[in-house]
Image (tube, rainbow, N blue to C red):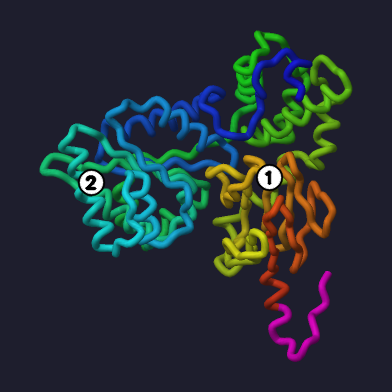
């Protein structure tokens, strides 16, 4: 790698959440303060939302690393689950083996655990990441759990973190009672142009730059133009630019090296790249927010998971902060993403180590067609375009509708 070339001791732009690299913009600092308030106040939920890659998971990991020993934590990341599966997940985090329990047993065990912890002087915290995927039934279970109390106070502290769709879900009429329990609600925005510069320099400093300017000043406006201030995109672009500068034996990254990286990633500027996505997940009519496609994940030929693809972005990778986690050494921490719009779905490689393959060809960016098979190591992801399926539905016999 390029560490020795640039005199660094760590990779400065890794995508995995690392508290050591946390950059506290004014919005990140405020969100962290809201999380910390849950330790002292038990009178409601804290809800933190933000775009994919805005730094929610890194904030959570930093917050957890700073907790006192008297705080008992359950952290749930897999959120496309039934109410019983959710309760089981929480109890597993608390050290139980609840898989043979019925719902009444699950609730009784959890309630007893919460009261025992309170009696022992310990605080109990539940953190749910990717909470936008929770069903209304699971959210109702969480609301009921928040009501467990002694004669003096509630005994379970709750933080819900998720993508902006979480706000739309909370505003639905079915969740009025839950929203009444929300004490603090905060949306984590992207970095400003000034904060982006400070963010890049901060991560380089933590990685061992010792004040050396590895990115020319005139690169920062360009980085902002192509990332929109989203930390994960900043990391991807800056890492690619450093790799390119290393390959050409450049001591620093200038505009030329940065533009080469942009071309390799096949990015357009952030504004045009996300123009269609800005109104996804809340501004389309309900008929357009329905499932547009789905994917079926298999491992060595055996089905392991199936996901619907409504309009929006699905990030796939090895770590729990992804929308779809594939726990394999052949899959990068943040491997690829599928962006779905009413017009179709696009697969994008997120600078993965082992690549993304469709039809035995490694792809950086690929417009998915019905029946495409995405290969990630030993996992295969079958893409089913529901629009194509609906178009074929009226057809009788073996004939298929024409595909584009």
Query: What is the chief secondary structure element of the magenta stretch?
Result: loop
The residue under the point 78% across, 20% down is: 218
Q: Is residue 245 visible?
A: yes
The residue under the point 62% across, 47% down is: 328
Please determine whether, in this image, residue 200 is positioned above or below residue 355: above
Residue 397 x %, y %: 76, 90
152 left or right, relative to 389: left
Q: Is residue 173 visible?
A: no
Q: Which residues are magenta?
A: 391-404
Q: Is residue 59 magenta?
A: no
Q: Secondary structure at mark 1?
A: loop
The residue under the point 44% across, 39% down is: 186
The residue under the point 76% across, 60% down is: 368
Residue 381 x %, y %: 68, 60
Residue 74 x %, y %: 36, 42
Which residue is tagged 2? 113
199 left or right, relative to 181: right
Q: Quadrant of the N terminus?
A: top right
Q: Quadrant of the C terminus?
A: bottom right
Please determine whether, in this image, residue 372 is positioned above or below residue 312: below
Query: Which quadrant of the figure has residue 306?
Result: bottom right
The disc placed on residue 330 is: 1
Q: Residues within 10 Å of mark 2 (few under 14, many from 20)?
A: some
357 left or right, relative to 13: right
Front: mark 2 or 1: 1
Q: Secondary structure at mark 2?
A: helix
Q: Nearer the viewer, residue 203 or 268?
A: 203
Q: Is residue 403 magenta?
A: yes
Q: Earlier in the sequence, mark 2 or mark 1?
A: 2
Residue 132 x %, y %: 48, 52
187 left or right, relative to 43: right
């Amino acid at each position: 790698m390029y560490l020795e070339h640039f005199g660094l001791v760590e990779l400065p732009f890794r995508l995995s959440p690392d508290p050591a690299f946390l950059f506290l913009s004014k919005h990140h600092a405020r969100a962290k303060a809201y999380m910390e308030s849950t330790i002292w106040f038990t009178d409601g939920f804290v809800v933190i939302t933000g775009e994919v890659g805005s730094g929610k998971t890194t904030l959570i990991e930093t917050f957890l690393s700073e907790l006192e020993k008297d705080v008992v934590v359950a952290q749930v990341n897999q959120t496309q689950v039934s109410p019983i599966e959710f309760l089981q997940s929480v109890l597993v985090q608390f050290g139980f083996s609840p898989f043979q329990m019925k719902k009444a047993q699950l609730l009784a065990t959890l309630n007893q655990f919460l009261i025992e912890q309170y009696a022992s002087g310990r605080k109990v915290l539940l953190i749910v990441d990717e909470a936008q995927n929770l069903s209304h039934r699971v959210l109702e279970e969480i609301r009921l759990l928040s009501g467990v109390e002694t004669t003096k106070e509630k005994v379970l502290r709750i933080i819900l973190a998720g993508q902006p769709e979480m706000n739309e879900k909370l505003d639905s009429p079915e969740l009025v009672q839950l929203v009444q329990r929300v004490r603090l609600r905060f949306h984590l925005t992207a970095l400003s142009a000034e904060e982006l510069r400070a963010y890049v320099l901060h991560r380089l400093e933590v990685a061992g730059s010792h004040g050396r300017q590895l990115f020319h000043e005139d690169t920062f406006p360009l980085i902002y133009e192509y990332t929109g201030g989203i930390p994960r995109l900043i990391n991807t672009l800056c890492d690619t630019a450093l790799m390119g500068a290393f390959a050409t034996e450049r001591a620093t990254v200038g505009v030329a090296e940065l533009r080469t990286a942009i071309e390799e990633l096949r990015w357009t500027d952030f504004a045009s790249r996300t123009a269609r996505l800005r109104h996804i997940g809340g501004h389309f009519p309900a008929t357009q927010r329905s499932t547009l496609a789905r994917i079926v994940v298999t491992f060595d030929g055996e089905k392991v998971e199936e996901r619907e693809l409504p309009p929006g972005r699905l990030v796939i990778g090895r770590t729990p902060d992804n929308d779809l986690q594939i726990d394999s050494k052949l899959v990068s921490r943040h491997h690829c993403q599928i962006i779905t719009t009413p017009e179709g779905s696009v697969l994008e490689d997120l600078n993965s180590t082992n690549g993304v393959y469709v039809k035995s060809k490694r792809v950086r960016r690929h417009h998915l067609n019905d029946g495409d098979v995405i290969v990630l190591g030993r996992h295969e992801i079958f893409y089913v375009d529901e629009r194509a399926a609906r178009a074929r539905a009226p057809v009788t016999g073996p004939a298929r509708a024409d595909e584009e």
